[in-house]
């Protein structure tokens, strides 16, 4: 160490450092040996840092690299259901009546999945083409939703009216109370059917509402849905009268949301329950 300090004597000389402590200027003397010691320590730290960096950069990987084959790359890009942890489907066969409510591509995908799993759905026939909607079924303003209740809308309406099917079902999309063009056409057809029967008997209009409203007290909620159903029944009754049905042959009834024909888990179900039904009674 003495030899090192002696060798560095030509590089390091005693130096004076001046530091102002806020009140006066102070002088500190740093001897040449002290400067040499600090220099050696600094060089040691630099050398150790360089060595650690080089050692870290050259560490061998824990698992040796293995060239990936084309098959391995394909397996990673397209893993099988088993590799992903999915179990085979055990879905039962679909009821035939669901073809009226479920889109053909959805049915086809369900049956394809069931066929791959070997379930009972493999024997189901091909999905038939969905027939165009006729009277008594849901109008073009509202399409059937996937959560539709079993049976046709007309059949369910008949079940709540002593088994008598409605002559028409008028839908009010958007929670409105005004008749759409499709609704007006349905009203004119019902009025024509009433006249064709000799204008005998009465026409009963039943107004309905969805159970969905904005946030409000329960009492106000019940009042609003009843008022909506009554307004729809009145709108259809007035349209029937304008179409030539005598006013004294038209009866109206408002039932609020007490007779839904669609589950309201989606907006389309709500639209399906916002309706008015026309019944021809002898």
Image (cartoon, helix red, strand yellow):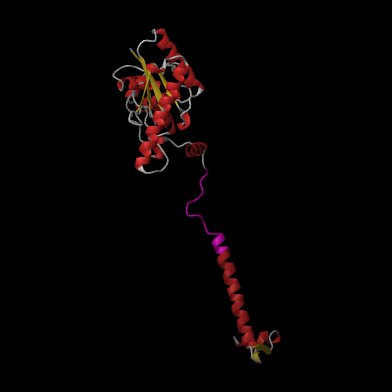
Q: Which residues are magenta?
A: 54-67
Closest to the observer, 232 or 54: 232
Q: Nearer the viewer, residue 22 or 59?
A: 22
Is residue 138 in sight in this rendering?
no
Residue 225 showing in the rendered view: yes
Q: Nearer the viewer, residue 250 or 214?
A: 250
* 228 or 242: nearer the viewer: 242
Residue displayed at 30% across by 17% down: 163
Q: Residue at x 37, y 37 (%)?
A: 223
- The verdict on residue 21 being magenta is no
Q: Position of residue 77 (x, y in %)?
A: 50, 38
Depicted 83 relative to depicted 49: above or below: above
Give the quadrant of the N terminus. Answer: bottom right
Q: Which residue is the extreme one toward the right?
A: 10
Q: How far from the left and from the top, in percent, is residue 251?
A: 36, 21
Which residue does the image show at 61% across and 80% down from the upper left? 40
On screen, 60 above or below 77?
Answer: below
């Amino acid at each position: 160490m003495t030899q090192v300090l002696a060798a560095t004597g030509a590089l390091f000389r005693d130096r004076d450092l001046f530091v102002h402590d806020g009140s006066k200027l102070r002088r500190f003397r740093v001897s040449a040996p002290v400067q040499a010691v600090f220099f050696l320590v600094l060089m040691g730290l630099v050398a150790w840092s360089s060595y650690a960096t080089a050692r870290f950069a050259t560490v061998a990987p824990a698992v040796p690299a293995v060239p990936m084959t084309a098959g391995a790359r394909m397996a990673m890009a397209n893993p099988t259901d088993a590799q992903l942890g999915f179990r085979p489907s055990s879905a039962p066969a679909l009821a035939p009546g669901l073809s009226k409510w479920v889109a053909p591509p959805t049915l086809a995908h369900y049956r394809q999945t069931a066929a791959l799993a070997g379930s009972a759905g493999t024997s189901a026939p091909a999905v038939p083409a969905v027939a165009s909607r006729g009277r008594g079924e849901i109008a073009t303003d509202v399409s059937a939703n996937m959560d539709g209740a079993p049976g046709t809308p007309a059949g369910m309406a008949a079940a709540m009216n002593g088994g008598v099917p409605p002559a028409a079902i008028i839908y009010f999309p958007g929670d409105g109370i005004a008749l759409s063009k499709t609704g007006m056409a349905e009203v004119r057809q019902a009025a024509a059917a009433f006249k064709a029967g000799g204008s005998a008997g009465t026409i009963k209009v039943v107004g309905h509402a969805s159970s969905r409203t904005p946030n409000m007290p329960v009492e106000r909620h019940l009042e609003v849905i009843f008022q909506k159903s009554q307004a729809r029944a009145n709108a259809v009754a007035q349209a029937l009268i304008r179409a030539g049905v005598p006013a004294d042959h038209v009866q109206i009834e408002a039932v609020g949301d007490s007779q839904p024909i669609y589950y309201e888990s989606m907006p389309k179900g709500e639209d399906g329950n916002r309706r008015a039904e026309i019944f021809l009674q002898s």
